[in-house]
Image (spheres, grey):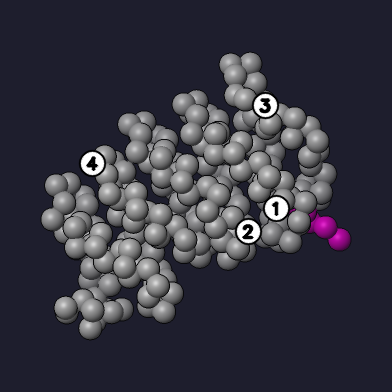
Amino acid sequence: MLSSGAAASVNLNYHDLDNILSQPETEHNWAQKETAIKSIGAACHVSIGHNQEYVVFIKSHRKAFSDSLLTERTRLSGAACELVEKLATSMGRDFGLHFPDIFTPALLKVCARTNKVMVTRAVKALQSMINAGCLPTLPKACQAFATNNKTLRIACIGLIASCIAQFSSQELEAYLGSFEPVLKEGVSDAAPEVRDTSRKSFKVYAQKFPERSSV
């Protein structure tokens, strides 16, 4: 017997959702897009990763979700961020298998904005991806750290620190070339928030890679 969440995923009207999400965002349809995205999020449950129709639908509308993340409309962007968070929380490790890089670029762009509400939501969504074991978020955050935007640097170093703390040395080893230069640069960053997080993260890194940290 299907759970209520499972039933919701089966009963989604993909044809109508496709019609809504495929349209360019306008003043007249953005609320419809918000409702559509919320309905997709409401269908999330722990076994949603096994629902191929659901997964394929999200993959095929990756541009629509990215555009919604990047919109200037706070409600629509918020709905898209919440969808990512729900997907990651519900799917766990399956999230990284199905959507390793679909949402990260857009979310990192949102992290560079002056709207604190949007930034907080984007960071929360990215953090949920890391918590779900989505390691490809790490190199993307390292690349994005190379910016003069203080808000983005603070967000990126926080995400990098989370990855270093959460993942094992074996998992992190392939990305040493990406995050070691960031830690080295971060400890002398102009922003105190970046310096503080970098120093704390270096201590965790040193425990996992004692030989490399001593060098």
Q: Is residue 161 visible?
A: yes
Label 1 is placed on what type of residue?
Val
Q: Which residue is mark 1?
A: 55
Label 3 is placed on what type of residue?
Gln
| Secondary structure state at the residue bearing disc 4 | loop
The disc, 4 or 3, on the residue closer to the chain's N-terminal end is: 3
The disc, 1 or 3, on the residue closer to the chain's N-terminal end is: 3
Residue 208 in picture, x, y percent from top left? 31, 78
Report the disc number at residue 23: 3
CA gap between label 1 and label 2 equals: 7 Å
Label 4 is placed on what type of residue?
Asn
Magenta residues, as a range? 1-6
Q: Could you classify mark 3 by the number of other residues whose Cα lies within 10 Å: few (under 14), some (14-19), or many (20 or more)?
A: few
177 or 42: nearer the viewer = 177
Taking the image as shown, residue 78 lies to the left or right of residue 120, namely right
| Secondary structure state at the residue bearing disc 1 | helix
Q: Residue at x 40, y 34 (%)?
A: 117
The disc, 4 or 2, on the residue closer to the chain's N-terminal end is: 2
Q: Residue furthest bottom?
A: 211
Q: Which residue is mark 2?
A: 98
The disc, 4 or 1, on the residue closer to the chain's N-terminal end is: 1
Residue 49 in picture, x, y percent from top left? 69, 59
User: Of the residues tagged 4 and 1, which is closer to the observer?
Assistant: 4
Q: Residue at x 68, y 31 (%)?
A: 22
Q: Residue at x 20, y 56 (%)?
A: 186
Quadrant housing the C terminus = bottom left
Whether residue 120 is in magenta: the answer is: no
Label 2 is placed on what type of residue?
His
Q: Residue furthest top?
A: 28
Figure quadrant of residue 18? top right
Report the disc number at residue 148: 4
